[in-house]
Image (tube, grey):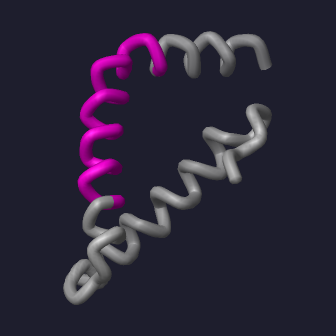
Amino acid sequence: MGNMSYCRFKNTSMDLGDCLDAIERGEIHDLVDYEYEGIEDILDYCEAILEYREDLEKACDESRRKD
């Protein structure tokens, strides 16, 4: 099930934080094949997202100025 549009980025950031914690604890060995496929997908998505980094940072800055 996908994330609801109003919370997709927050939910995904929390999930990525959980993945980072697992990586830092060395929990990347002896995974099942689909988990390694997931790691590869995450790396591809992160690389693609970083292409939008300036736009994303600008949007975040603009949002903070509204508050």
The quadrant of the rendering that contains the C terminus is top right
- Reply yes or no: does residue 39 show up in magenta: yes
In the image, is residue 10 above or below residue 55? below
Residue stretch in magenta = 38-56
In the image, is residue 53 above or below residue 66? below
Measuring 37% from the left and 65% from the top, which residue is drawn there? 20
Q: Where is residue 1 in the image (x, y as percent from the top left)?
A: 70, 53
Looking at the image, residue 3 sits to the left or right of residue 15; the answer is: right
In the image, is residue 15 above or below residue 43? below
Measuring 46% from the left and 57% from the top, which residue is drawn there? 16
Q: Position of residue 12 (x, y in %)?
A: 57, 49
Q: Quadrant of residue 15?
A: bottom right
Looking at the image, residue 67 sits to the left or right of residue 43; the answer is: right
Looking at the image, residue 7 sits to the left or right of residue 50; the answer is: right
Measuring 34% from the left and 50% from the top, which residue is drawn there? 42
Q: Position of residue 64 (x, y in %)?
A: 67, 20
Q: In which quarter of the image is residue 10?
A: top right
